[in-house]
Image (tube, rainbow, N blue to C red):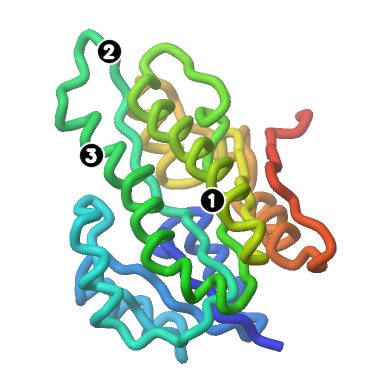
Amino acid sequence: MPHTIVLTGAGSGIGQLLAQRLHERGDRLVLVARDAPRAEDFTAAFPGSTAIVADLAHPETLADAVAAADLPVQVDALVHAAGIVDLGHVADLPVTSWNEQLAVNLVAPAELTRILLPRVRAARGQVLFVNSGAGLTAHPEWAAYAASKHGLKALADALRGEEAPHGVRVTTIYPGRTATPMQAKVHEQEGAAYDASAWIDPASVVTATLTALDLPRDAVISDLTVRPGPR
């Protein structure tokens, strides 16, 4: 039976591949797009899907964007796969970098979850956060990004307890370094050569994500870490 899935981050990397896999198996996609042209691209790439036109960098606009979209009364899963990264030492990072990463990586997921929770509750559905290894450990130059991802873990942990009485499952996936355009950008910021074959294939993270989404209702994968395997 097809499910209704709201997904952020469908334009690239893990989110894009997840959208492809969900669409191929017949799930109904609601994709968050930052502007109208991107929304048209999404609905063309995934026939039968719908879009919420909203810029995650401005979480205060999400409520109106969701209200303007034609959404079903039940949402089986809300998957947060969008994210941005901007590395730098604490001594050098401007406040704009902190604000942007916190907005996209933490505040927007919190706000979108708040807005859609009645629909997720109606389906006794699931909220899944694609976090990061940086959500568990912070390394030099990763302060702002890791802070946003540590905050995302806190959001998921609190939400899990709050929504259990409503039958809502909450899952966090913590991928290690994965071969995505974001990883290429990270290597550029680090001044390091990028070899995609050295890192996790996004398909492996998507498979882990689908496993969590498809788990029978008698159980929940609350936290799942996916690390690069031995080479």
Q: Amino acid at mark 3?
A: Glu
Residue that appears at 39% across and 33% down: 148
**Picture quarter with the C terminus:** top right
Relative horizontal placement of residue 213, taking residue 180 as reference (left or right)? right
Task: Tell me the SS state at disc 1.
Answer: strand
Q: Secondary structure at mark 2?
A: loop
Cβ–Cβ under 8 Å for marks 1 and 2: no
**Looking at this view, is 173 or 156 the one in front?**
156
- Residue assigned mark 2: 90
**Hey, which quadrant is residue 169 in on the image?**
bottom right
As drawn, the label of residue 129 is 1
Question: Residue sitting at 57 percent across and 31 percent down?
Answer: 133
Q: CA distance from mark 1 to mark 3?
A: 18 Å
Q: Amino acid at mark 2?
A: Val
Q: Position of residue 18 (x, y in %)?
A: 57, 64
Residue position marked by numbered label 3 in the rendering: 100
